[in-house]
Image: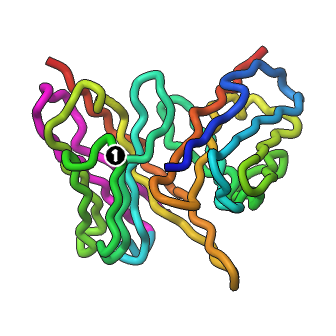
């Protein structure tokens, strides 16, 4: 199975900050890498698919990059509604494993 | 509007069974693969199972293989997850999610969208 790791596991940031979250796969997943945002009590929502394509309706302050084993999610200009937990997920092979998550909270 | 609504969660004793349902609307259900994903209290997301639109392809996480069964009724636009031999560690919010995809001439990308709000399964004596 492909193992996914994320760093950091949590971070504190202020509104307007640029936030960078990294995700690493235990083997190459090509560009089959997705990012999700999850808020407590809500349904998770896709932010990025195919490593760098913005999901429908997702603000342009979110961006994704990378291929192979190393990926990055950037939030450029953090907004109050962005405080949440972010997960990467590989869709290269079953099981479609998730990373452990990165919790972004208010500094 | 594309929507997924889960139901069937509840409190069950270890060793017990439960059947979760996910009602889909707003899209042609039979043409999409579907998934179950769970989140244990204080933990991250864990993919549980997936089923193709025609039910030809079914996959399970090792943690539930042999105990959980995924199924679907395309006529009713519904997805199911039968949970048997439940363990305390199966306690979680269970989400259903649709597999969405985008294909170019050389590759296909797949992701989970949308997701339902989830249904809570608590396994406790």
Crowding near the residue tagged with mark 1, few <14, some 14–19, many ≥20 C-alpha atoms within 10 Å: few
- Above or below, A86 against B66 in this view is above
Work out whether residue A81 or residue B52 is closer to the camera in this orientation and state it: B52
For mark 1, what is the residue?
A: B62
Q: Position of residue B116 (x, y in %)?
A: 43, 49
Residue that appears at 62% across and 73% down: B108
Regarding residue A56, the answer to whether it shows in the image is: no
Write down the chain letter for disc 1: B
Residue that appears at 66% across and 25% down: A9
Q: Which residues are magenta?
A: B1-26
- Quadrant position of residue A44: top right
Q: Position of residue B4 (x, y in %)?
A: 40, 55
- Above or below, A51 against B102 in this view is above
Q: Is residue B95 left or right of residue A92?
A: left
Work out whether residue A54 or residue A79 is closer to the camera in this orientation and state it: A54
Q: Quadrant of the C terminus of chain B?
A: top left
């Amino acid at each position: 199975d492909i193992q996914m790791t994320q760093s950091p596991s949590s971070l504190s940031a202020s509104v307007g900050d640029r936030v960078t979250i990294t995700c690493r796969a235990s083997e190459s997943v090509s560009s089959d890498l997705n990012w999700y945002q999850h808020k407590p009590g809500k349904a998770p929502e896709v932010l990025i698919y195919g490593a760098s394509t913005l999901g429908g309706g997702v603000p342009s302050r979110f961006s994704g990059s990378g291929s192979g084993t190393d990926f990055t999610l950037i939030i450029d200009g953090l907004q109050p509604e962005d405080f949440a937990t972010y997960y990467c997920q590989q869709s290269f092979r079953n099981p479609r494993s998730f990373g452990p998550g990165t919790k972004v909270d208010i500094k | 509007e594309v929507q997924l609504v889960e139901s069937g969660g509840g409190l069950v004793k270890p060793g017990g069974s439960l059947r979760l349902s996910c009602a889909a609307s707003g899209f042609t259900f039979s043409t999409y693969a579907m998934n179950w994903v769970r989140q244990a209290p204080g933990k991250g997301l864990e993919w549980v199972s997936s089923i193709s639109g025609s039910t030809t392809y079914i996959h399970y996480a090792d943690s539930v293989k042999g105990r959980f069964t995924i199924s679907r009724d395309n006529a009713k636009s519904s997805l199911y997850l039968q949970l048997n031999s439940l363990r305390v560690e199966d306690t979680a919010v269970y989400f259903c999610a649709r597999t969405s995809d985008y294909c170019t001439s050389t590759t296909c990308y797949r992701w989970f969208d949308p997701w339902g709000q989830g249904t809570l399964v608590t396994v406790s004596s």
